[in-house]
Amino acid sequence: MIRLGVNIDHVATVRNARGERFPEPIAAAHAAVLGGADQITLHLREDRRHIRDADVELIRAGLAIDLNLEMACTEEMVAIAKKVKPTHVCLVPEKREEVTTEGGLDVATNRDVVKSTIDELRTAGIPVSVFVDPDEQAMLAANEVGADIVEIHTGRYANAATSGAGAVARELLAIRQAATTAKQLGLRVHAGHGLDYRNVWRIAALPEIEELNIGFAIVSRALFVGLPAAVREMRDEMLRARELAGQDL
Ligand code: PXP
């Protein structure tokens, strides 16, 4: 089985754009559950540009399914995670000027802060994932600092579509090799970023990957078909790809 984490950050982006109280992320979370989401994913950014502290608390309290909290390695975020106790935390790099999370966390360069963040969260009983680029060194570094899970950044794969089939194949191979290495190291493997209804199947077909976290494509599709249907369509794509894996994709 492969699980779908639905990232609803951009429901909050719409709310905040008008300084309104709606659309409410908690309502979006319930709608995503109706569509078959296995998990809600929220990125509490340091600048609170979309999701806010109150959204995280409301969703944690009001929802029976898993919550994946994406956050930077800061003392403030660790304190929030310890209070909220999400199902797991995903550590991401954060630059204020970026539009979205543009690259994976450089675990080797930031070894001490990543390790101490992981230690503190794990001591609080929270499993930790690190969002990393698809390369072997990143998998080794994630393992070395004690991560439970790697979330492989699929942004380069998604962007490769504009450069042709060869580029897509190269990026897919990098993800595949990284996923295999991570699994051999005993890490659990998730993936996400830039996945949409057209490109998700190749990633969902990789047997090492247990979970995909997808936001922008689902929230965009929801404008036309509603959120439960948008989630259901994505889930169906993923499950079909997984079923077909092993056949000639
Ligand atoms: N996974 C992580 C760690 C992310 O930071 C993001 C973007 O917030 C996603 C997945 C989802 O990316 P997208 O919105 O492009 O589906």
Image (cartoon, grey):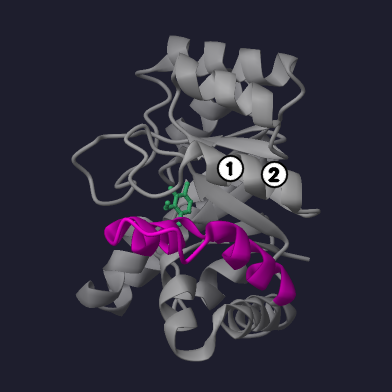
Residue 48 falls inside the magenta stretch: no
Q: Position of residue 55 (x, y in %)?
A: 55, 46
Amino acid under disc 1: Val
Question: Which range is magenta?
Answer: 6-34
Residue at label 1?
Answer: 56
Residue at label 2?
Answer: 60
Q: Are marks 2 and 1 in contact (CB under 8 Å)?
A: yes
Q: Position of residue 23 (x, y in %)?
A: 47, 66
In the shown orientation, is residue 205 left or right of residue 18?
A: right
For mark 2, give the secondary structure: helix
Which of the image's four quarters has the N terminus?
A: bottom right
Report ligand 1 position as a quadrant. Answer: bottom left
Residue 9 falls inside the magenta stretch: yes
Residue 100 against residue 128 in the figure, above or below: below
Q: Which image quarter: residue 123?
A: top right
In the shown orientation, is residue 230 left or right of residue 38?
A: left
Amino acid under disc 2: Arg
- Name the residue rendered at 22%, 45% in the picture: 98
